[in-house]
Amino acid sequence: MHILIVEDELGIVQFLQQGLQEEGYQITTASDGSKGFELIKNQKFDLILLDWMLPKINGLDLCKAIRIKDQKTPVIFLTAKDTVHETIEGLRAGANDYIKKPFSFDELLARIKIHFRTFEKEEILTLGSIKIDLAKHIVTNNNIEISLTQREFELLTYLVKNKGKVCTRNDILKDVWDIHFEYDTGVIDVFMNAIRKKLKLKIEEDYIKTIRGIGYIANDL
């Protein structure tokens, strides 16, 4: 997931960037509203953390501009403004959430994860003839429903979300199994074999390739 931080306080930017990167998020930063707007025009972000008091274009106006271009990407205000009137003003501008400074990183992280889960519920992922309906928790291949266990579903979803990127076995253990210590990665191969058998992929439907000694990569053919 790619997060944009639009914030002019360097200390806050460094704190957020380090913490969120350690959680596995890709981070881009902008130090003023104008730079933030240029980035938003030219790139796709999965979530935007937005300060209210910004140079050049303030956060409120930037949020309104974001919503003209993009109705879906979650926007969270990080601001010292905390009156009821200001909170309502921020939400009316199109923000999804509002966190008062100073804030707990753990609270911010929890809010981010909630917004990502909400956003994911609207998605249907595709990989060639494979479709994953995240809201209904249904996987189909050539319009035939495939019965997967919870862990198989999570693993397949992870690979498809990272389509085109090599997913190492260690990354899969960390991000899918939530295991952050040394563990036998052979368990992943067992699950992958089960997924492939259930999908009944033909030779020309080799959407998930094994990278020997490293992991897996999912790609449309």
Image (cartoon, helix red, strand yellow):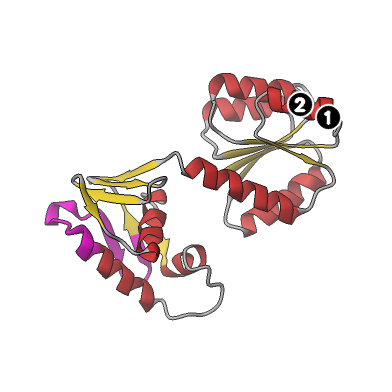
Residue drawn where x is 36% and y is 59% of the image: 153
Residue at image x 75%, y 45%?
13
Q: Where is residue 215 in the image (x, y as percent from the top left)?
A: 37, 66
User: For residue 195, which quarter of the picture?
Assistant: bottom left
Q: Which of 138 and 29 is in front in this view?
A: 138
Q: Do the residues labelled 1 and 2 touch (CB within 8 Å)?
A: yes
Mark 2: amino acid:
Ile
Question: In terms of secondary structure, where does tag 1 sit?
Answer: helix
Membership of 29 in magenta stretch: no
Q: Which mark is residue 88?
A: 2
Q: Quadrant location of residue 10?
A: top right
Q: Quadrant of residue 50?
A: top right
Q: Which of 141 and 56 is in front in this view?
A: 141
Q: How many other residues sit within 10 Å of disc 2, few (<14), some (14-19) or many (≥20)?
A: few
Q: Position of residue 101 (x, y in %)?
A: 83, 43
Q: Residues within 10 Å of mark 1 (few under 14, many from 20)?
A: few
Q: From the image, tell me which residue sits under label 1.
A: 84
Q: Distance between the residues labelled 1 and 2?
A: 6 Å
Residue farthest toward the left in the current orientation of the protein: 203
Tag 2 secondary structure = helix
